[in-house]
Amino acid sequence: MRYTLVAVALALGLAGGADAARRPAIAGMDVLTGKRVALSQFRGKPVFVSVWGSWCYGCKTEAPTLARFVEAHGAKVAFLGIDTEDSKRGARAFSNRYGLKYPSIWDPSGMLAGAWSRGAPTTLVFDRRHLFVRRVEGTASLAQLNAALKQVTRS
């Protein structure tokens, strides 16, 4: 039974570090500024990565919660987005509408997002060493975000 659960977790992409090591680096050009941004630039800080698109209904539902969470916890952890299968115009409008104040990698083909998630919205959580810790698929609740925060800010 235990081996079956492990096999299912691996098949679903729920395994931690080893699975994450085979994925592409989370890096690219910020959809808003055009500057390069990468997970690796947030050394020593846990990082929450939001996979989103302006076309995504769940992302629209989640955005106000994420914006409040970022405002409340931005000193403890870093935030980064992956804007997937979107236009720059749509991304800018979405960011302005919901007051998103973190950089988002523009991923118009969905290649980066597809390597790390099964769709938008998804929140990826990395610890201080940038080891993959948790994936929240679908619209993240404040309770799920707080549980992930507690997990990555423990000493």
Image: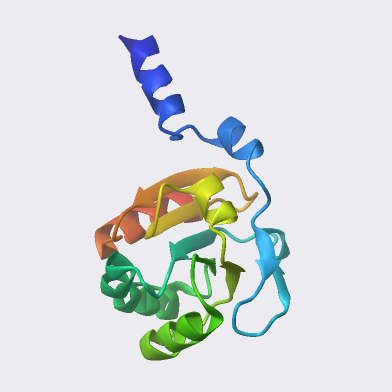
Placement of 52 over or under 102, stated as above or below = above
- The answer to whether residue 31 is left or right of residue 8 is right
Which residue is at 55% across, 81% downward? 88
- The answer to whether residue 130 is left or right of residue 149 is right
Q: How many labels does the image show?
A: 0
Q: Where is residue 143 in the image (x, y as percent from the top left)?
A: 26, 59
- The answer to whether residue 83 is left or right of residue 22 is left
Placement of 69 over or under 14, stated as above or below = below
Classify the position of the N terminus by image quarter. top left
Q: Is residue 154 at least partly visible in the picture?
A: no
Which residue is at 66% across, 85% downward? 33
Along the viewing direction, whichever of 65 and 84 lies nearer the viewer: 84
Q: Where is residue 28 in the image (x, y as percent from the top left)?
A: 69, 65
Placement of 54 over or under 3, stated as above or below = below
Which residue is at 57% across, 33% downward? 19
Q: How is the image coloured?
A: rainbow
Q: Where is residue 48 in the image (x, y as percent from the top left)?
A: 50, 61
Along the viewing direction, whichever of 103 and 57 lies nearer the viewer: 57
Q: Where is residue 75 in the image (x, y as percent from the top left)?
A: 53, 75
Along the viewing direction, whichever of 39 and 89 lies nearer the viewer: 89
Q: Is residue 133 at least partly visible in the picture?
A: yes
